Image: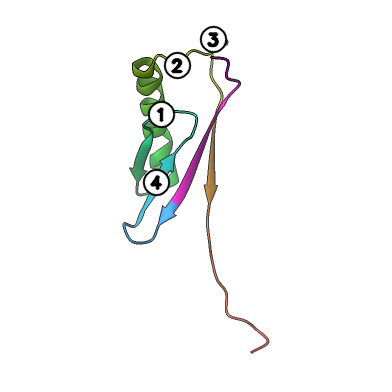
Amino acid sequence: MKHVSIIVRAEWDDEANVWVATSGDVEGLCIEADTVEALEPKVLAAIHDLLELNGTRFDTPEIPVHIVTQQFARIPNPCM
């Protein structure tokens, strides 16, 4: 299987008050942490383990991992 990089999506879960990371590129990846900074090392370690367990092959000595975060915010409407 030829891959160029791994895309991980991290989203804030309001109910659980944690960041949750998942990826369509790594089967079984679902990691939680209180902060994005705490999420990164957990994600990288889990990806390493899951790639080995799943037998996923890459053609490069290092695998780029992109952790993309999404945040949602609201502000009061100044015109109301």
Q: Are marks 4 and 2 in contact (CB under 8 Å)?
A: no
Q: Amino acid at mark 2?
A: Thr
Q: Is residue 73 above or below residue 66?
A: below
Per the image, label 4 sits on a secondary structure element best described as strand
| Span highlighted in magenta in the image | 1-11
Q: Which mark is residue 61?
A: 3
Which residue is label 2 attached to? 56
Magenta stretch contains residue 29: no
Q: Position of residue 44 (x, y in %)?
A: 42, 28
Tell me which label, 1 or 3, sits earlier in the chain: 1
- Which label sits in the foreground, 1 or 3? 1
User: Could you tell me which residue is drawn at 52 percent across and 56 percent down?
Assistant: 71
Q: Position of residue 13 (x, y in %)?
A: 39, 56
Badges 1 and 3: C-beta atoms under 8 Å apart?
no
Gap between marks 2 and 1 measured at Cα: 9 Å
26 in relation to 31, above or below? above
Tell me which residue sits at (57%, 11%) in the image.
Answer: 60
Q: Position of residue 57 (x, y in %)?
A: 48, 12
Mark 1 to mark 3: distance in Å? Answer: 20 Å
The residue wearing badge 1 is: 27
Q: Which residue position is annotated with label 4? A: 20
Look at label 3 and name its amino acid. Pro
Residue at (40%, 14%) from the top-left corner? 55
